Image (cartoon, grey):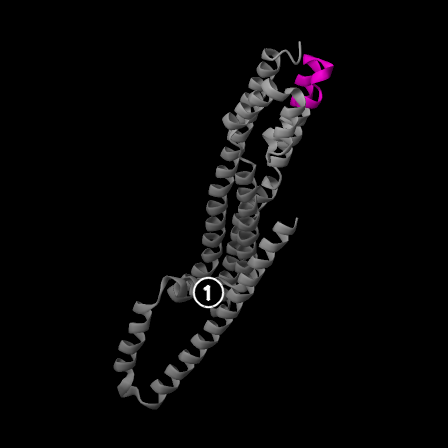
Amino acid sequence: MKKQIAILALFGVLIFGSFTLAVAQEGDTTQTQSEQTEAVSSDQEEAPMMDVAAEVPAEEASFHQRIKEKFIEGGASFMWPILICLIFGLAVSIERIITLNLATTNTKKLLAQIEDALSKGGIEAAKDVTKNTKGPVASIFTQGLMRSSEGMEMVEKSIVSYGGVEMGRLEKGLIWISLFISLGPMLGFFGTVIGMVGAFDAIEAAGDISPQVVAGGMKTALLTTVGGLIVGMVLQVFYNYLVSKIDNLVNDMEDASITLVDLLVKHKIVK
């Protein structure tokens, strides 16, 4: 829980920083446009030189600056919720990746240690090995070894039951990533619909279908869809990676559990 709060706090700082930069750039853009308008009105002869000067920063604008410009053009009322979906989705994804990587265990090495402990110190030595090892596989082994005195059937039931518990822990948080994958594009489409309605209102108010009015309104409306689709694609990659990681861990748990039962039979711990 502390790890999740720390990650969310970090992304919260990033959100605040991005908001400050966006507002600052919006102010700078407005100020620059105002200065250019005053210069044109005062001296029309310098207009060609100003156009050339205005084109140079546009060509030299970095990728980060272009992203911020498109973010501002899309409208804060819809772009900010989409950005929040991306940030929270990435926070949950990173937390899950860290947790799953920490849950990964070298099952071959662990099984070799358990077999050595069974041959030298018996069931209690094997329990000490599993208790001192982190990860879901070691936890399942501990539950199975604790039921070894009750027979093979109880060992198998214990392994299966606790395996389901560990699998539920591994899949924790995936539902939130799936939510953000769906919510991001939906917010984008919703923003596009609202933007198109605003564009048609502008056309109705102008009383004429000019290309400038139509293109400007549609551009602003479609930017929210682009943002939502980017969020969905990025989070979908993380989601598929996490699902693949969980499948690998579950397969390792199942294979290792079968090997553990074989070791208990081999050393005549259970019958």
The majority secondary structure of the magenta stretch comes to helix
Residue located farthest toward the front when viewing the structure as drawn: 120
- Vertical placement of residue 160 versus 181, above or below: above
Q: Is residue 163 visible to the viewer in this orientation of the structure?
A: no
In front here: 261 or 8? 261
Q: Residues within 10 Å of mark 1 (few under 14, many from 20)?
A: some
Taking the spot 68% from the left edge, 25% from the top edge, the residue there is 143
Residue 154 drawn in magenta: yes
Q: How many marks?
A: 1
Horizontal and vertical percent position of residue 246: 54, 33
- Whole-percent x and y of residue 17? 52, 66
Residue 57 on image: x %, y %: 32, 72
Residue 248 in the image, given as x and y percentages of width and height: 51, 30
For the C terminus, which image quadrant? top right
Magenta region includes residue 185: no
Q: Residue at x 44, y 76 (%)?
A: 28
Q: Relative to 96, say whether 192 is above or below.
A: below
Instruction: Using the rendered image of the protein, determine whether residue 245 is visible from the camera's viewpoint.
Output: yes
Residue position marked by numbered label 1 in the rendering: 73
Which of the 4 image quadrants contains residue 266? top right
Instruction: Please report the residue visible at 47 percent of the width from the left and 49 percent of the height from the top.
Output: 229
Report the side of 52 relative to 180 (left or right). Answer: left
Q: The disc labelled 1 sits on which kind of residue? A: Glu
**Secondary element type, mark 1:** helix
Residue at point 52% right, 48% down?
185
State the residue lying farthest toward the bottom. Answer: 42
Q: Which residues are magenta?
A: 144-160
Point out the residue furthest to the right here. Answer: 150
